[in-house]
Image (cartoon, grey):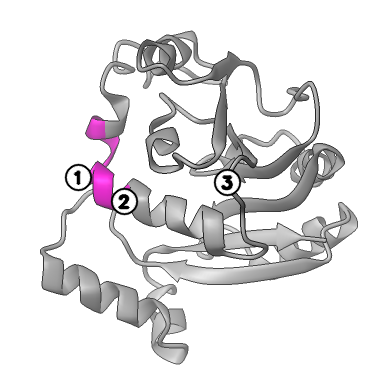
Amino acid sequence: MTWEKYSGRAEAWTQRAYADSDRYLARRAALVRDLGPELRPGDTVLDLACGDGGLGAFLPEQRYVGVDAHPEMVAAGRAHGREIVEADLNEYLPPGPVEATTIFRAIYYAGDRRALLERIAGYTTRKLVFDLNPRQYRLADVRADLEAAGWTSLELRPFFVPQTRSLPGPAAAVSRTLERSGPLARLALRFRFTYLCAAAR
């Protein structure tokens, strides 16, 4: 895995990576909890390729465990009191089952996507939540890999919170309305933005 772009940048990574990190991660965390089977207080969320673990601050009712292969990211997350394991997402096995596993902005790190999805299915009891750029990966191909790995349902939600631009309050409200607009949302996804996906069994 190429780490050069992260070296020396792990400190305050969350703030550097997002124009409005609080809004972006709060929205992502809400979907982690509510999209697909709902998470309960005390459930464990295993966040693969977690960076500095910034998502954990927005899941206060769940036990958050991050996994990242970059030692500087791991150190930065631990410095903020987060539980982070240094490991490659393709190889990591938690010591016991977890209710939810997440992979954000990192599905392309999979050496073998179908094998990774099957591995995650072996230790995840409720759902897998990940983001998907439909211009980069065909949804039909990802769905086929999920089914082959034992995931029998897939719930999708367009995610229109921009990563590199901060929207004023009214514009943010409009973007959330557009996420549920059906054909308009699918049209927008042909040009930008991503799906948030929750796979379950």
Amino acid type at circle 2 is Tyr
Q: Quadrant of the N terminus?
A: top right
Q: Which residue is mark 3?
A: 41
Left or right placement of residue 70 versus residue 170 in this view: right
Residue at the (33%, 17%) spot, across then down:
10
Mark 2 or mark 1, which is nearer to you?
A: 2
Discs 2, 1 touching: Cβ within 8 Å: yes
Q: Magenta stretch: give its range.
A: 15-24
Circle 3 sits in a helix, a strand or a loop, which is it? loop
Mark 3 or mark 1, which is nearer to you?
A: 3
Q: Earlier in the sequence, mark 3 or mark 1?
A: 1
Closer-to-camera residue (82/16): 82
Crowding near the residue tagged with mark 1, few <14, some 14–19, many ≥20 C-alpha atoms within 10 Å: some
Distance from label 2 to label 3 (Cα)? 22 Å
Left or right placement of residue 89 versus residue 177 in this view: right
Crowding near the residue tagged with mark 2, few <14, some 14–19, many ≥20 C-alpha atoms within 10 Å: some
State the mark number for residue 176: none
Amino acid type at circle 3 is Pro
Circle 2 sits in a helix, a strand or a loop, which is it? helix
Q: Position of residue 9 (x, y in %)?
A: 29, 17
Q: Which residue is mark 1?
A: 19
Q: Quadrant of the C terminus?
A: bottom right
Distance from label 2 to label 1 (Cα)? 8 Å
Q: Which residue is mark 2?
A: 24
Closer-to-camera residue (167/184): 167
Residue at the (89%, 57%) spot, across then down:
148
Closer-to-camera residue (200/140): 200
